[in-house]
Image: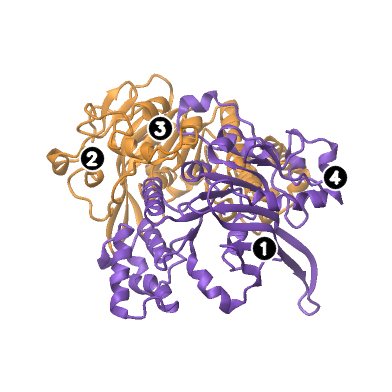
Amino acid sequence: MSQQAASSAPGADLTKVDKGETLLEVRNLKKYFPVTEGIVMHRTIGNVKAVDDVSFSIARGETMGLVGESGCGKTTTGRCILQLERPTAGEIVFEGVNLEQLDAKALVPVRQKIQVIFQDPYSSLNPRMKIGSIIGEPMRVHGVQPDAKKRDQRVAELLSICGLNPRFADRYPHEMSGGQRQRVGIARALALNPDFIICDEAVSALDVSIQAQVINLLEDLREEFDLTYLFIAHDLSVVHHLCNRVAVMYLGKVVEIAESDELFDNPLHPYTQALLSAVPIPDPDVELQRPRQTLQGEVPSPMNPPPGCVFHPRCALAVESCQVGIPPLRELRPGHWVACTEV
Amino acid sequence: MSGPGYPGKGRSVAKLLEIRNLRTQFFTSAGTVQAVDDISYAVDEGETVAVVGESGCGKSVSALSILRLIPDPPGRIVGGEVEFMGQDLLKLSDAEVRQIRGRNIGMVFQEPMTSLNPVLSIGRQLTETLEHHMGMTTAQAQSRAVELLEMVGIPEPARRLKQYPHHFSGGMRQRVMIALALSCEPNLIIADEPTTALDVTIQAQILELMKDLTKRLGVALIVITHNLGVVARYAERVIVMYAGKIVETGTATQIYHNPRHPYTIGLLGSVPRMDLHRGKRLVPIDGQPPDLTRLDAGCAYRVRCRWAVDQCKESVPPLQEFADDQYSACFRMHELTTEVDVAS
């Protein structure tokens, strides 16, 4: 199984970040969800390989983009890092500590340092809590600020950092617009002074003009608090704007990783190329000159992925060997890794 | 407002649809929502027009009003005319409008799972329409349905006809919706956010398909979308809506290269562009869209507008011609700096 060995080998190399200190390493992460049948005789009839052998690393201060279409495993990867899902295999190493070896109690201090902003500001805020309690709760739970008065001061401070009026602390989520709620979600993520924030489609549900406000806010906070982001999104224009480095996922696997400029100017994997050419650009002249490379067919089922390279049934470059071996990530240019044997 | 003119008024090409002074309101406990407030535009035969704007700007309601699909209560079309192929749709009886829906005007909605009937096979949904509107026999409708599915690129059409909507993926369902919309050879298709629920590669497939088919069959298309990128590639004419009103219209090139309304400029400044260099800060629009139950006598955009002057408080700027085919509803449309990043 030389292919197998090859595909798990680059984990070690890939995690080496050239610049700065490594904050997070994901090594050979796998997350399989069992598919069961029957009520009495509960049998597992297969696995959905949501994340299948994914490795990457993030340096402190970096913004890493994780892109791909629905079902490619980008959100599951984020949830595994957050320890909201326990991985089937692999390691999540945060500040040198392997989180998989920690029990629930030992994870508590780590959870303060890793926070998340969710996509839907309507379902991620408790409708029966006031904004002040929503933002104050993490501080209370972690015992960071047991004094209620000081906590309220901190809530007011967080609200104004996120561009909201401190008086909003007395409101309920339903009294606020989508953009305002997303700012509350950001304030809550900041409450514990985290080092690392996972933004899972954090701006996808917002209207364009509000989305731009929130993107600018995320950029300002990154500067001000030295934050590291993992920005999970399907909107490539937003990822291009915000991220230093980007990993592209397809059907549970990372197919390409590179610096943002390098990836967008010089995509190497056929899937990345098709993905980029499908993104519409808001300029009619540019659009009409752009060749469009429409991808045929649809993403196969993750329960029964194609053998070999998972992209081969839709790939223009596919040769016979693509149906057999899983292509390992190869470094074709400095820092630019591609999982394709034909480029 | 029977004023000096409205977009598309004086054109020579045959007009298919002419909307004049359309007003649709919703009567809610919070007050009367002016969802569509006095809008007028025309669509030519075979033309593709895009209506863009953010949530709640009235773009969907204006399209649903064309087909009289506004739920009543709470909504009601309170004024205006919708002239389609020489008759005012707002004056027809319900039975007469039903003959036009699906026959002369096809619809493609955002979420194909909720607009297809989950308990009828795809084939039945297609043949029902064909039998009802085109007077076909069951056998004729069957073979036409196979042709239609083939035309929208669904493999093994004869087998797929027997399947139900839940057997299809999102992209395939949207293809079925397009086949349904095209089934009776309509003159106009209204597509309300047809690709918003789809992944980007599937979105590209569906948009290319819609463009090909409408061009080949000579069908006019109204696309309603919030995605400015989609508009740039597919629309000949663009209508920008804000708070229930048309604030600017023009050709795609005019709107993208020489916007003449502060809101259009703001929208373009808000979108990150993949083809431009990174590191440039976005120029968002400050504040939030207004509450449509509390609009006053002035321009609804003025509180968010960098160019607002006292005049904007006193009256709503009318839609006025700026250049051939380009209209803007701004008192200062001649003074605006076109550079999108002027504020940065």
Q: Which amino acid does label 3 sit on?
A: Val
Q: On residue A91, which mark appears?
A: 1
> Mark 3 and 4 residues: CB-CB less than 8 Å, in contact?
no
Residue A242 placement (x, y as % from top left): 47, 45
Q: Mark 1 lies on which chain?
A: A
Q: In this view, does B62 lie to the left or right of B274?
A: left
In the rendered image, which quarter contains the N terminus of chain B?
top left
At mark 4, the secondary structure is loop
Q: Which amino acid does label 4 sit on?
A: Val
Q: In this view, does A211 lie to the left or right of B212?
A: left
Residue B137 placement (x, y as % from top left): 70, 42
A163 or B148, nearer to the observer = A163
Q: Colour of chain A?
A: purple
Residue at which label 4 appears: A324
Residue at which label 3 appears: B238
Residue at which label 2 appears: B306
Disc 3 versus disc 4: nearer the observer: 4
